[in-house]
Image (cartoon, rainbow, N blue to C red):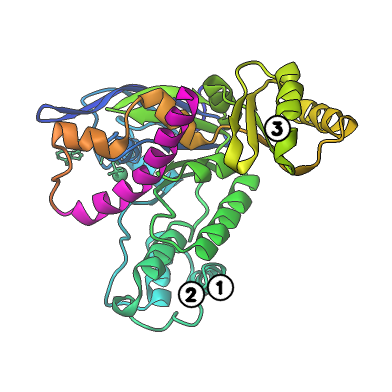
C-alpha cells in the first residue's frame, strides 16, 4: 500500500529546465521524509506539485490516499503547508493572522482564539502577538507562518525549509514541535539545507540533485555508504606515538595517519563503539596516556559531497544558475552553508591524500 505521500515519475519542466526529472517518493504514515539538496535541486518544485500548487507535466501523486491531479481540492483539505517564504498578512497582528487561518478552516471563533493562544506560546510569539507583523523580524515571521500551518492538525504536512533563518534556540524549539507532531501520527515531508536537521528529524532521507533522487535511505544507511568510520587518538607523550601507531594498526582497516605536531593518530575502522573500547584497553595495557580519543562517524555533509561529487555553489557557477532574480540574498546565504561543507570536504580529501 502506498504511504501517506506517494509520487511516481514526477516530471516538471520550466522552459528547458527539468526542475523535476522523474521523482519517486513513498512516505509511510506517521514518518518524516527529509528532502535534501542544493539550491535549484527541485525541492520546492516537488513540494508545490504535491500540494496542488503546480501541475506536473507527467507522473502520479497521491497524498493522504487522494489523487493529487484528479482531486486537488480534496487534497488541500487534508494537508498543511509552510512554504519557503513566509506568507503572513503584514497588516494584521500575529494573533489576527492565526484567527484568520482558523476561520478559513471554519473553526468556531472561541476554538480559533484558544488555538492561537496555544500556538503563539509554542512559537515564542506571545509578547509580540498584538503587533502588526510588519514589525516582526524575519525569524518571527517564519515562526508565525509555521504556526499558521499548524492551526488545524492535518494528517499530512509539508514544510519547505522550515528552519532557514531561525536562530539556534528557535530551531531547537521547532524541532521539538515537529517531534511532537509526528509522535501524534502526522506524516511530514520537509526540505532542508541543514544536513544536521534531516539527521535529527527524518526517518528517511532523499537526496535530490538536478531534479532526480540520487540517494535514499536512513541517515545511518547513507552514512554507511560513505564509509569513513575512524578512530582518532591524541596521545599525551610524543614518544608514545610509535607504539600507539602499532596498536592502531592492529585494529585498523586501512592506513594509519599520524600528525606529529598534534600527537594525533587516525585509523579507519569498522566495529563502532565496541572496537573503540578495545582500543582504549589495549592502549592502557601498554601504558600509553591518552589526551583524547573518539570514534568519528561520517556526517551527512560527507555523505552529500561523496554522492554529488560537487559542491552546491560550484555547480551554480558552472551552469550560471546563480542569477535567479529575487533569490540572490538566499543564494548568498546558502553558498555559506555549502562553503562549510566545501571546507570540510577539501580538508578530508587532503587527509586522505596523506
Ligand atoms: N516558476 C518557475 N519558472 C522557471 N523556472 C523555475 C520556476 N520554479 C523553479 N524553477 C527552476 O527549477 C529548478 C528547481 O527549482 P526549485 O525552486 O524547485 O529548487 P530548490 O531545490 O527548492 O532550491 P532552493 O534550495 O534554492 O530553494 C531551478 O533551476 C529553478 O530555477
Ligand atoms: Mg526551495
Q: Which residue has dot 1 on it?
A: 121
**Residue 255 percent coordinates (x, y):** 60, 18
Name the residue tied to disc 2.
125
Q: Residues within 10 Å of mark 2 (few under 14, many from 20)?
A: many
Q: Residue at x 37, y 47 (%)?
A: 337
- Residue bearing mark 3: 241
The magenta stretch spans residue 331: yes
Q: Is residue 328 magenta?
A: yes
The picture places residue 354, in percent across and down from the top left corner, at: 49, 25
Q: Which element carries disc 1, helix, strand or loop?
A: helix
Q: Position of residue 90 (x, y in %)?
A: 27, 73
The residue at 30%/30% (across/down) is: 69
User: What kind of secondary structure does the magenta stretch mostly adopt?
Assistant: helix
For residue 17, side relative to residue 158 (left or right): left
**Mark 2 or mark 3, earlier in chain:** 2
Q: Are marks 1 and 2 in contact (CB under 8 Å)?
A: yes
Amino acid at each position: 500500500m502506498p504511504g501517506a505521500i506517494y509520487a511516481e515519475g514526477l516530471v516538471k519542466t520550466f522552459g528547458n529546465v527539468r526542475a523535476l526529472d522523474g521523482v519517486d517518493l513513498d512516505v509511510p504514515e506517521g514518518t518524516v521524509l527529509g528532502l535534501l539538496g542544493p539550491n535549484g535541486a527541485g525541492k520546492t518544485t516537488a513540494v508545490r506539485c504535491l500540494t496542488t500548487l503546480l501541475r506536473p507535466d507527467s507522473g502520479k501523486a497521491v497524498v493522504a490516499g487522494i489523487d493529487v491531479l484528479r482531486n486537488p481540492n480534496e487534497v488541500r483539505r487534508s494537508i498543511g503547508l509552510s512554504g519557503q517564504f513566509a506568507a503572513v498578512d503584514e497588516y494584521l497582528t500575529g494573533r489576527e493572522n492565526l484567527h484568520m487561518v482558523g476561520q478559513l478552516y471554519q473553526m468556531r471563533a472561541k476554538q480559533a482564539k484558544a488555538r492561537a493562544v496555544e500556538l503563539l506560546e509554542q512559537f515564542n510569539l506571545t509578547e509580540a502577538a498584538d503587533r502588526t507583523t510588519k514589525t516582526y523580524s524575519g525569524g518571527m515571521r517564519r515562526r508565525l507562518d509555521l504556526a499558521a500551518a499548524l492551526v488545524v492538525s492535518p494528517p499530512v504536512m509539508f514544510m519547505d525549509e522550515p528552519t532557514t533563518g531561525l536562530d539556534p534556540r528557535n530551531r531547537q524549539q521547532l524541532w521539538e514541535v515537529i517531534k511532537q507532531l509526528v509522535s501524534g501520527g502526522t506524516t511530514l515531508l520537509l526540505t532542508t539545507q541543514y544536513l544536521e536537521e534531516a539527521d535529527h528529524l527524518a526517518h528517511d532521507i532523499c537526496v535530490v540533485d538536478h531534479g532526480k533522487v540520487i540517494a535514499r535511505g536512513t541517515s545511518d544507511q547513507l552514512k554507511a555508504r560513505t564509509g569513513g568510520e575512524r578512530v582518532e587518538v591524541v596521545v599525551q607523550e610524543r614518544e608514545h606515538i610509535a607504539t600507539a601507531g602499532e596498536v592502531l594498526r592492529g585494529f585498523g582497516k586501512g592506513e594509519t595517519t599520524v600528525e606529529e605536531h598534534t600527537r594525533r593518530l587516525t585509523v579507519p575502522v569498522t566495529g563502532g563503539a565496541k572496537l573503540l573500547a578495545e582500543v582504549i584497553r589495549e592502549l592502557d595495557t601498554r601504558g600509553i596516556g591518552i589526551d583524547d580519543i573518539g570514534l568519528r562517524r561520517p556526517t551527512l555533509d560527507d555523505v552529500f559531497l561523496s554522492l554529488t561529487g560537487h559542491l552546491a555553489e560550484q555547480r551554480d557557477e558552472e551552469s550560471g544558475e546563480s542569477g535567479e532574480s529575487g533569490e540572490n540574498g538566499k543564494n548568498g546565504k546558502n553558498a555559506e552553508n555549502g562553503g562549510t561543507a566545501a571546507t570540510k570536504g577539501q580538508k578530508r580529501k587532503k587527509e586522505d591524500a596523506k
